[in-house]
Image (cartoon, rainbow, N blue to C red):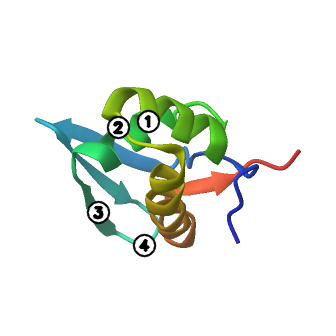
Amino acid sequence: MIELTTKIVQTPEILAASVDDETMAMDLESNNYYGMGRVGSHIWELLEQPLTIVELCSTLQKKFEVDSETCQRDVLPFVQQLVDEKLVRIVKA
């Protein structure tokens, strides 16, 4: 389960490319394709470096002018889905 202090980063084996404001990602192991919209693409870019959910939301709040509670409520399930699909991994402390 993802928590606000969980640190995550992109899984290096995932191939991704940006097309306009969207990101297309492919898991080479499963051959699954994923599409991410504008906000999801920005999250994907930010996760090139390990970040906690708090750090991620802090950056997103500035860019998209959203409050902390809304950001966390929207980001947590999205990030959990990325973890479940193995597009990102949890960084162990």
Residue 52 visible in the snapshot:
no
Residue, disc 1: 60
Amino acid type of the residue tagged 2 in the rendering: His
Pointers 1 and 2 in contact (C-beta within 8 Å): yes
Residue, disc 2: 42
Q: Is residue 25 above or below residue 81?
A: above
Pointers 3 and 2 in contact (C-beta within 8 Å): no
Is residue 91 found left or right of 67 in the rendered image? right
Q: Gap between marks 1 and 2, in whole Å? A: 8 Å
Q: Gap between marks 3 and 4, in whole Å? A: 11 Å
Q: Gap between marks 3 and 2, in whole Å? A: 15 Å
Nearer the observer: mark 4 or 2; the answer is: 2
Q: Gap between marks 1 and 4, in whole Å? A: 30 Å
> What is the x, y in percent for residue 35?
24, 58
Residue, disc 4: 30
Q: Residue at x 62, y 47 (%)?
A: 53
Q: Quadrant of residue 88?
A: bottom right
Amino acid type of the residue tagged 3 in the rendering: Tyr
> What is the x, y in percent for residue 13?
51, 49
Q: Residue at x 53, y 53 (%)?
A: 69
The one nearer the camera, 79 or 72, is 72
Residue, disc 3: 34
Secondary structure found at label 2: helix
Q: Earlier in the sequence, mark 4 or mark 2?
A: 4
Q: Residue at x 22, y 37 (%)?
A: 18
Q: Is residue 70 above or below residue 59?
A: below
Is residue 52 found left or right of 59 in the rendered image? right
Pointers 3 and 1 in contact (C-beta within 8 Å): no
Q: Earlier in the sequence, mark 3 or mark 2?
A: 3
